[in-house]
Image (cartoon, helix red, strand yellow):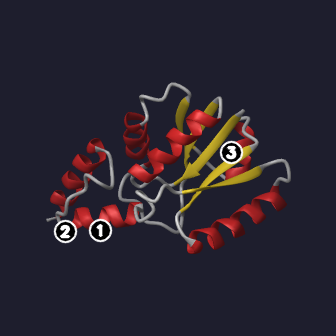
Amino acid sequence: MRVMYPGSFDPITLGHIDLIERCSRMFEEVVVAIMGNDSKQGTFSMAERLELAQESVKHLPNVEVKIGDGLTVDYAVKENCTLLIRGIRAVMDYEYELQHAATNRVLNPKIETLFLVADPHYSYISSSVAREIARFGGDLKSLVPCNVADRLIERYAQEK
């Protein structure tokens, strides 16, 4: 089965990678779809996110990272995926993701959503937390891969 894990991945975190690794063991093919999000101001461009994510999952031969466009369900169809993967860290995530899953079902009843609970070691991690810690020069090693940590440090050093 070919599945899609959509997200903004700005930047990709160790929590995202854990979910991708788990999916790569459960499914034949995993498409990590970097989707634009008009409600979020991006720290990294879509091309930078693609590069960082590809580098972070290069050890997984059945995982492709792509830049998606349009509605997630439409992009899933374009990529021949019938299952969307979403990570759940806490109740707040569940409420948000449930609303999106229901909307996606209305838009395309052939697309299912599977919620995977975050590993407790990563349940506190988010891209926004990583960005905030990077902004103040904090230690990123428990939040993001080394390639991402380096780019975050570089990005926020330019702002100073």
Please state, as top left, top right, bottom left or bottom right, where the N terminus lies in the image: top right
> Is residue 28 at all visible to an observer of this figure?
yes
Residue 59, quarter of the rendered image: top left
Left or right: 153 as drawn, with respect to 101: left
Instruction: Rate crowding at label 1 as few (under 14), some (14 to 19) or many (20 or more) other CA atoms within 10 Å.
Output: some
**Amino acid type for the residue under numbered disc 2:** Phe
Place of residue 20 in the rendered image (x, y in percent of width and height, measured from the top left): 52, 42
Place of residue 100 in the rendered image (x, y in percent of width and height, measured from the top left): 69, 65
Left or right: 134 as drawn, with respect to 40: left
Could you give the CA–CA distance between mark 1 and mark 2, rounded to whole angstroms? 7 Å
37 or 21: nearer the eye? Answer: 21
Q: Are marks 1 and 3 in contact (CB under 8 Å)?
A: no
Could you give the CA–CA distance between mark 3 and mark 2, rounded to whole angstroms? 36 Å
**Amino acid type for the residue under numbered disc 3:** Tyr
Place of residue 68 in the rendered image (x, y in percent of width and height, measured from the top left): 59, 45
Instruction: Rate crowding at label 2 as few (under 14), some (14 to 19) or many (20 or more) other CA atoms within 10 Å.
Output: few
Q: Nearer the N terminus, badge 1 or badge 3?
A: 3
Instruction: Rate crowding at label 3 as few (under 14), some (14 to 19) or many (20 or more) other CA atoms within 10 Å.
Output: some
Q: Nearer the N terminus, badge 3 or badge 2?
A: 3
Please state, as top left, top right, bottom left or bottom right, where the C terminus lies in the image: bottom left
Residue 138, quarter of the rendered image: bottom left
- Mark linked to residue 113: none
Residue 50, quarter of the rendered image: top left
**In this figure, which residue is indicated by the disc labeled 1?**
132
54 w.r.t. 39: above or below: above
**In this figure, which residue is indicated by the disc labeled 3?**
75
Q: Which of marks 3 and 2 is in front?
A: 2
**Residue shown at the point (59%, 73%) measured from the top left:** 91
24 or 102: nearer the eye? Answer: 24
**In this figure, which residue is indicated by the disc labeled 2?**
136
**Residue shown at the point (39%, 53%) measured from the top left:** 11
